[in-house]
Image (cartoon, rainbow, N blue to C red):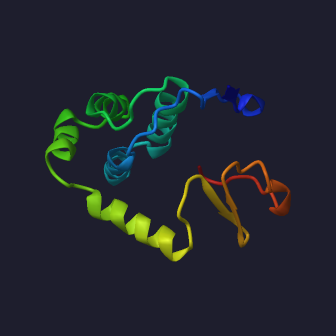
Amino acid sequence: MAGGTSESLTINIDTTLVVDSRNAHRLLKLVADRELNRFEAWDSLYSRHFESNDDIADWTVLRSVGEQVGLAGGDITMLVETDECSAAVDDDIRDAAALGISSIPTVLANSVRITGDPSVGLDRIEVRPAVGR
């Protein structure tokens, strides 16, 4: 079943692959380190995973996303061949654990934690316009 239609998102959850997203998160860290558009990279990964059902653990997919947002091929090869950005991902995992987060998606806002479908429970959060996305 496709979800997210109320927000113009296509989510093919029934066919979405279950994959280890660690390398995708490493890619996102490198995009941010290079001061490229991390939101574009995130959106592309999201689309590739949930809309196209691509394997975002596959380096061919990750290379495509990285190049799309302007990462040099050598930077992506470095990710493939080293553990670059792994420490930053590990730090994020530790920070999440310290906040009691053990699954995704988890939304924290105004001291309210929502795990799973964030549309359930949003009525408990004061909504304000996003600034500086």
Drawn side of residue 7 relative to residue 106, left or right: right
Task: Name the residue: 28% across, 64% down.
Answer: 87
Quadrant location of the N terminus? top right
Task: Name the residue: 65% across, 58% down.
Answer: 107
Using the image, determine if residue 22 lies above or below residue 4: below
Task: Name the residue: 75% across, 53% down.
Answer: 129
The mark tally for this picture is 0
Query: Where residue 117 appears, x then y in whole percent?
Result: 70, 48
Drawn side of residue 116 relative to residue 38, left or right: right
Drawn side of residue 100 relative to residue 68, left or right: right
Query: Where residue 9 appears, x then y in whole percent?
Result: 66, 30
The residue nearer to you, when weighing 22 against 110, is: 22
Query: Where residue 63 appears, x then y in whole percent?
Result: 28, 32
Q: Residue furthest top?
A: 52
Using the image, determine if residue 77 lies above or below residue 83: above
Using the image, determine if residue 56 lies above or below residue 100: above
Q: Residue furthest right?
A: 123
The residue nearer to you, when weighing 64 against 16, is: 16
Task: Name the residue: 29% across, 37% down.
Answer: 71
The residue nearer to you, when weighing 45 against 97, is: 97
